[in-house]
Amino acid sequence: MAVNENGEDLLVRTIRSCADRIYAVPGYPVSSLAERSGARFVINEKVALERAIGDSLAGRRACVIVKHVGMNALVDPLVHATFQGLNAGVVIVCGDDPTAKNTMTVQDSRYFGPVASIPVISGVSESGVSDAFSASEEFSRVALLRITAEEMRSPAPESGSFHTTCSRCSAQSRISGLAGSDLTMYGRAVRAASGSARISAAGLAPHPLPPAPSSPAPQNRKERGSTLGLCAACPFRPHFELMAGKGLSAICDTGCSLIAMNPPYSFGVASYGMGSAVAVAASSGDMALIGDYALLHSGLQALIEVYQEGLPLLCIVMVNRCMGMTGGQPVPDPLPYLGFADPQVCDAGDLEQFERLLSIPDRPKTILIYGRCPEVIDHETVAC
């Protein structure tokens, strides 16, 4: 161990050793840690975690460095990742400021452990980052390493010589750590909860969701008497069929794009919450499938970054000008918000134009498909 090495030095070395990709949003007390680790600075914490989840799907370990207030911004994909699952490990290194020295709020990030049912490791140690990645892969969910400014300034603990290799859990070699696409979200939650007893043994509260009362196994949608599918007169049905027929795969968002994960289409890979498709797809594949509301809700920041970096992503936006799954509430036209993207626009009735545009690009490409939802929405059919 280097002479006078402090906690931050140790964290820099272990993060660089264990992670294939590193993302960060700077802020006290982790700004220096993020910079010295060589992290890519991302537009916000939510996008940073979504990018890391995309790396996980592609088999790469990813680390996200944020301050404690940043945890509030990324909690949506954090919780979705527990229910959806991961492949390679994802670790959040969170810097807490318990005395509010350089922040306006005081919070303890360890409370996100029981909220999201994730493993939490606290403090700086030689094995902490490696242990967090191993826990993430073992339980197929994000792991949290919580540190403070005082711990980073203190001399690193004497725990033997530093090893430049980082142990890899066998979970990373799996084809996928995702739950089956035929499961309900409740079924996914039950599956996520099944590992909580082992996690709680390490000091976390058990997941609050009880087992399914009628069966020890997760229930599929058919057993519950409902199926998530497109409306009979959905204008986007031919587009789903076309994408499925071409053998494409997509990261889906919340809303009707979720249906791409279900038979008879099954070209959707995963979904990690509202507005997440763009950033996850930017790191894991070629195509994001998202609705107009989800894009405006919280997908725009990721799309801005995709264009700034020139990433080869195809973003397909289904524009129906309403929240189709929650009652048909109106949504603004996204086109005025997308001047930076110079999107291709096509009418849902012109399938030939969409097919001409449907190709995986070598630079960012956005397609807006304009269609009109059926006037009568059967919520028993389309509601999650």
Image: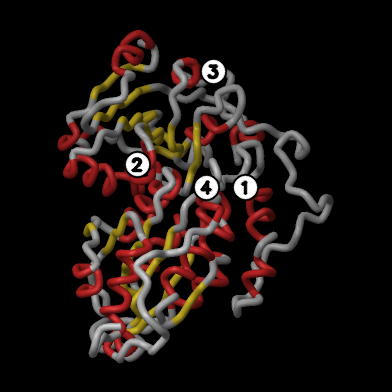
Quarter holding the C terminus? top right
Between disc 4 and disc 1, whose residue precedes? Answer: 4
Do labels 2 and 4 touch, CB within 8 Å? no
Q: Residues within 10 Å of mark 4 (few under 14, many from 20)?
A: few
Among all residues in the image, which is located at the extreme top?
A: 352
Decide which of tag 2 and tag 4 comes sooner along the chain. Answer: 4
Q: Amino acid at mark 3?
A: Ala
Location of residue 174 with respect to 52 vertically, above or below:
above
Residue 42 marker = none
- The one nearer the camera, 272 or 148, is 148
Sequence order check, earlier mark of 1 and 2: 1
Which residue lies under the disc numbered 1?
Answer: 185
Query: Which residue is identified by label 3?
Result: 233
Residue displayed at 30% across by 59% down: 22
> Camera-side residue: 293 or 183?
183
Q: In the rendered image, which residue does mark 4 sit on?
A: 173
Tell me where residue 300 appears, x and y as whole percent: 28, 45
Dot 2 falls on a residue whose secondary structure is helix
Q: Amino acid at mark 4?
A: Ser
Residue 313 horizontal/vertical position (percent): 29, 34
In the rendered image, residue 218, in percent from the top left (x then y), is placed at: 73, 48
The answer to whether the residue labelled 3 contacts the one labelled 2, judged by CB atoms less than 8 Å apart, is no
Secondary structure state at the residue bearing disc 3: loop
Residue visible at 23% across and 38% down?
A: 311
Q: CA distance from mark 3 to mark 2?
A: 27 Å
Q: CA distance from mark 3 to mark 1?
A: 25 Å
Q: Residue at x 77, y 55 (%)?
A: 212
Q: Is residue 351 above or below residue 110?
A: above
Q: Quadrant of residue 211?
A: bottom right
